Image: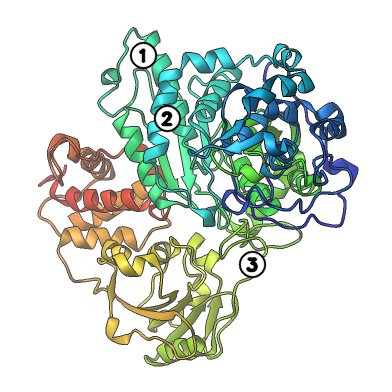
Amino acid sequence: MTDPQPSAAPAHTAPPHAMPPQVARPDAAPLEAAPLEAAPLEAAPLEAATSDSPVAGATSDQPAAAAAGESLATLLHGYGVHALAPRRVVAALTEQPQTLRGLVQGSGLPRRSVEIILRTLDGDLHTAADGRLVLRAPTVDRYRSLIRYAELRASAPVDPLAAEVRRHSALITTMHGLIAAAPRPRADLDHVPATAATAVRRAVWLATHYDLREAELLCVGDHDLTSLALLLLAARASRSVHGTDSPSSAGTDGRAPGGTAGGLRVTVVDIDEELLAFLDRSARAHGVALRCLYADLRLGLPPSVAGHADLVFTDPPYTPSGVSLFAARGAQGLADRERGRVLVAYGYSERTPALGARVQKALLDQGFAFEAIWPGFHVYDGAEAVGARADMYSCQPTAATWKRLDRSDRSGGSGGEWESGGSSTPPRSIYTRGRHAEESQADELAAGAITAAQRFLAAVPGRGVFVGDRPLPQAAAHTRLPTVLDRGLPPSTTGPSGGDTRSVVVDLTDDPGPWLLRLLLAANADRLAVLVDADHPDLRSGQPFDLVRAKWTRTPEHDETPTGAGRTRLLSLTATDQTAGAAPERLVRWLLERAHGRLGNVWRDGLIRVARDQPGAPLAQRAALTTVHAALTTGREGGRDAGADATVLPADLLTARLIDLPRHTLADVLDAASTSVGLLPTATA
């Protein structure tokens, strides 16, 4: 979910069809009572909202916009039929001291609305030394009478999931620990973590509403660790069925008896490399199998994921373009066009319904039908300004959805192109803050950087290629970054003879972090220069250059800090000698130069090629594949990395592309590929 920034509500009003009624089925009541619109689109972030914040953005039809000195009774009257939530705020204060966060989470009201309610309590409320809000004891009975406390508590909504969620209290405790150990939320990716109870609630809901035996779930982004919660829940259920009660009963590959967590398979695609490593490590530690793949959804969905899932869950950035993009990519992942569903966590503040209408319209424009909406289903640790809540949307794709996606596939291959609002390019700005915020625009390349790029291309005769939003003067060929990352440099960038030196300059000044490594995998050329920000995290670690050292050699003597280009730096690399190096290094280079191919096929063919230079009969394809599979398990068998922490790579990794592997998995795969050369049979029949 997102923790949005404040902004004025748009002046226009969405057409009636853009705001279908919210539907709450009787079997899916929320844990806490909350207004129907109880999740964020935009409002001040937690840190920005204070108890003396002005009531900005309130309009005449919003009862929470109380004048200074307004009484609680008047405010409650203004809420009309929606007064249950503010009454619960006051009720909670009459029971025990409360934090502002607790009041927001418990009521689902935006923080600003809660602050207005607190103002009506005037001098009867004070802040304790520990920061909690305390109602003066002599006033408790008066306020309980005002809000009809006994009646309020007697009318608390029944949550049919509550008992089942409470039954998994041990899992909630486990999820608390995992969430605490997870990488810090990234503001530039709109991360706001869901509570541990919400992660388990999602898992319980999925398990009780769908037949997950042998099912496949795709999580489009998963900072909330929903994948782990569901796998752990399913694994415990599977162990119960098989008469075991400990993770030690899992198979040797970390899979529960009868399959992954009782047959359930879960895949996560995410742009956050650190998160993917954490998810993978945590799944292994708990004896469940989780497939993690890298994806910048603006550039496409990994081909090995497309068309395989039975269900999709996503908690996207809460902007119209973000929700629309994540949901559409989720639909691309569905195997069954009739029965597949995309489950979206989204909501909006009661104070800004027009913003909610815009997002709902974006989903409708993608052709989705809202099968059902469960209000206030998700609760978050943060985003208090907008209620710390989100709704659960069950979205059913329609013929219009598939028509749009099929048109996109025809124009962009494996999803590298995007069609939204008449544009054929993927949306760049989908977040609420950071350099890729919805309101932001990419800066044009500075003149000094352009000059440095031209100088690099002119240094060696041959074919010059520029990769960026706009063509570069004096470059013979131009292509866009999404094209290169999705499919590599197109044939049009090669010289007429095919033998000319190809020098490539790539504009990565807008890189959020992971593009540099993906570019080094995607681009094949003789010389490469990359324009990056001087603060790029990989410049400090140097890790991506180390991972691809069999393909690229850094030539820092040709680096530049262009004059008048701010913090932009030009990094220079040259291709390694294809004939140099021992057999393991040549195989690794073979893989790196074919990063868009299916890993199992590329690895197999590379081993066959390496075997040609060794004594014995030619290596057959079946023998090569056997060697590949043996290399995947070498860590467990005591080969390349014997020990308790040895990494065992799952066989389904071979269906993915090298460029789609998370960074930590990429390192393991290249290590295993190097090891596989030593596992070749000395003679092949």
Mark in front: 1 vs 2: 2
**Relative to the observer, which residue lies in front, 80 or 191?**
80
C-beta proximity under 8 Å, tags 1 and 2: no
Mark in front: 1 vs 3: 3
Q: Position of residue 90 (x, y in %)?
A: 69, 28
The residue to which callout 2 is attached is 175
Residue 239 disc label: 1
- Asked if residue 397 shows in the view, the reply is no
Residue displayed at 34% across by 36% down: 282
**Relative to the observer, which residue lies in front, 224 or 636?**
224
Element carrying mark 1: helix
In the displayed structure, 472 sits above or below 396; it is below
What crowding class fits label 3: few (fewer than 14 Cα within 10 Å), some (14-19), or many (20 or more)? some
Alpha carbons under labels 2 and 3: distance apart: 35 Å
Q: Could you say which quadrant of the image residue 249 lies in? A: top left
Residue displayed at 81% across by 29% down: 82
Alpha carbons under labels 1 and 2: distance apart: 19 Å
Element carrying mark 2: helix
- Asked if residue 473 shows in the view, the reply is yes
Q: Position of residue 198 (x, y in %)?
A: 54, 29
The N terminus - image quarter = top right
Q: Is residue 631 left or right of residue 437?
A: left
Three-letter code, disc 3? Ser
C-beta proximity under 8 Å, tags 1 and 3: no
Three-letter code, disc 1? Arg
Q: Position of residue 504 (x, y in %)?
A: 43, 79
Q: Is residue 622 left or right of residue 641?
A: right
The C terminus - image quarter = top left
The residue to which callout 3 is attached is 440
**Relative to the observer, which residue lies in front, 169 or 579?**
169
